[in-house]
Amino acid sequence: MKSRIALVGTPNAGKTALFNALTHSHQRVANYSGVTVESAEADFFLPGGDALSLVDLPGAYSLRPYTEDENVLADALKGTSFAGMILVVDATQPERAIRFLLEVLDSTDSPAVIALNMSDLAEKRGFEFDMVQFAALMGVPVIPTAATRKKGLPELLGALEISLKNQKRRRSAFFPAPAESVPATRVSERVLEFYKRADQLLKRIMVRKGFPDERSRKIDRVILHPVAGPLILILVLGIVFQLMFNLAQFPMDLIDTGFSWLQGLVQNSGLSVGVKSFLSDGVIAGVGGTLVFLPQILILYALILFLEDFGFMSRAVFMLDHLMGKVGLHGRSFLPLLSSYACNVPGIMSARTIESKADRVITTLIIPLTTCSARIPVYGLLISAFIPNTEVFLGLKLQGLVMLGLYATGIFFAFLMGGIFKRFLFQGRRPPLLIELPSYKRPSMRSLLRGILYRIKLFSKRVGTVILSVTVVIWFLLSYPQDGGAVASGIEHSYAAQIGQWIEPLLRPIGFDWRIAMALIPTFAAREVMVGTLSTVYSIEGGAAVSDVEKLSMILKQEWSVATGMSLLVWFIFAPMCVSTLATARRELKSTRYMILMLVYLFALAYLGSYLAYRAFS
Amino acid sequence: MRMILNSESSQKLGSLEPGTRGEIVGFGVAEDHLDFLIRLNEVGFVVGEQVEVLGRAPLGQDPISIRVKDAVYALRRDDANLVLVQVMGNS
């Protein structure tokens, strides 16, 4: 196995940019405290040709863990799993840099090199360091770098190569003190003592102090303006969602057309009926039905990454904290909630950056109520089948309004449940907020692209494994047992139908028949499969391929009552129909109880909501 | 806690108007907040350090943004009140 090198640094020091510049993997860079939610790992080469593996660990202000993210770092450094470290600090924040470096160097003993990153910016702002003194006082090489411009990287790798061979360091174990063994007041005293030492070192290292970052201050005057600020925030969110839907339309149509063409190709081929059905109704319908909204996910991610990189996200947290506090949430819940609109799973993972357990649990519990993009195809199908597209007011169409209403209902209940959980699960004082408002930076298109490629990779993996196997299993359950060669038209005798019929009594009060029950089962693997399953159900039942959504919605209109359609729409707002989300929640909160709570409260809301909708429209 | 150094002219950081500069002279009592106090120390809020209140959040005038060392942080006014400041003037 290759030796592993840890990439360790303070938040916003350009650690992930350095990771991207040194390796060839797809990991995003972001200008938001703690955005490295999962540590990425990738290979890189030393000048001498040796291949090593670089691990991008979460950024931290100190090794005394305060957030879950910093816990990950502290745990990682405690072990002996790393052959060496690259310590990344921001040259424009020398005080923080020195403190962090001292702390890490004191409490570890593996060979290390320091990347004094953003040295180009520091130079521009007038900072000057005595590099010889710097390295001498730290006891390890210090290399000025500018990761986004790829400056200083060969020197850094050269220093690392030499250090790995020759460097001997000792752990002085002065800091951090384990929290349990020392009273907190003593910890605080030690912190102060430690900082005195750091400041003394800094005086010897920093020849000249630079100017403050006036540019960021000017931008803040606009973005955080009492009137313009909130308007800009609303505008930005509006544009994000507009782009997500409008920009995605064309590629989505393209993907859709592509898969219909493939289906046609299969249908007209000389393959046997059974194989045709498997390929067309099973594989192509299932995979295509999921891939089709990849553009939406990617666009939302690209925009979030862009805003994070720029430095806008922490400002949004700053502006929204007060408002979110009114419903029992923390300002930091904003980013996890926003990411959840693409997919709940990464949303839950990014909740790691929330310091307090209570806020992290509450945010995680309500995330499934945000409208992830997997719900969009289902909403789209049901709306086109059951909502007339009449003009309501000034060109506003009813279908669009209902879509908006579904989003609004989701977030309304998210906030409502957040308030309820806060009140009954976590009483007491609101945990403090401490968030850095970093300098604005021009987002790097290169790392944006890498971030997007990374998403595509993750998504394709999911489509190729989970979604594909589920679709195949569903196709099997729907198509078997068979008597005779042709696919039996009697789908009501299939295994799936038997399962559906078995559940039906439970779901009859909310207006679902065995077909819907049957189509709901696979949605636990992935919500979006619903559309594919329904089209398979009705293609097989009707004996003809139902390839496109328009045809399917026509069929649903004939087969279902409006009340059933409405009930199913409401069901999809609430129901916890995604195993990955539940599993991620359990893993992140390290608690089965919270996962069960999530499952139960969402099912209760879904059942109740659907029941009311069904009654109201019957 | 021993850290209370409440000279007469000190004010709570959360109560200061935007544009006010000052020097940190001490910290309020924070029995249930010790962890947070240490984190404040760690990011640079230590006795003797200069701070400047830059602004308040547009909605609800809370949190406030504070410059300390080379960085800017957002703190809720309630939490910022843990920090006691000797006012040095306005910018």
Image (cartoon, coloured by chain):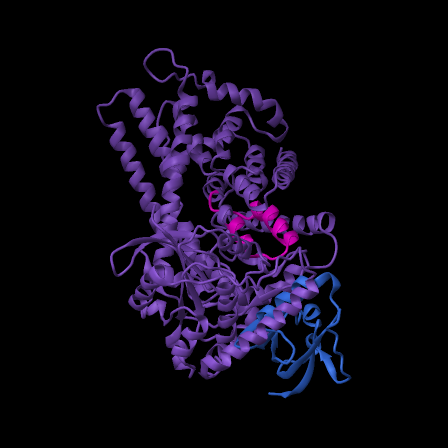
Chain colours: A purple, B blue
Q: In this view, does B34 lie to the left or right of A154?
A: right
Task: Give residue A498's position: percent from left, percent from top.
Answer: 51, 18
Task: Give residue A280's position: percent from left, percent from top.
Answer: 32, 29
Residue in the image at 38% along x and 11% along y: A483
Instruction: Please tell me whether residue A211 is drawn above or below residue A141 in the rendered image.
Output: below
Task: Give residue A534's position: percent from left, percent from top.
Answer: 45, 30
Whether residue A397 appears in this view of the structure is no
Closer to us: A616 or A297: A297
**Which quadrant would residue A246 be assigned to in this image?**
bottom left
Magenta-colored segment: predominant secondary structure: helix
Q: Tell whether position A363 is magenta.
A: yes
Residue in the image at 72% along x and 73% along y: B3
Task: Give residue A344's position: percent from left, percent from top.
Answer: 51, 47
Please identify the residue farthest to the top as the structure is shown: A484
Quadrant for the N terminus of chain A, please: top left
Whether residue A539 appears in this view of the structure is yes
Q: Is residue A375 left or right of residue A149?
A: right
**Number of numbered discs overlaid on the protein picture:** 0
Q: In this view, does A606 lie to the left or right of A126?
A: right
Instruction: Please tell me whether residue A451 is drawn above or below residue A320 in the rendered image.
Output: above
Closer to us: A72 or A484: A72
Please identify the residue farthest to the right as the structure is shown: B8
Instruction: Please tell me whether residue A274 is drawn above or below residue A380 in the rendered image.
Output: above
Q: Tell whether position A101 is magenta.
A: no
Closer to us: A436 or A309: A436
Instruction: Tell me where the magenta segment starts and ends, as one range.
Output: A347-374
Quadrant for the C terminus of chain A, please: top right
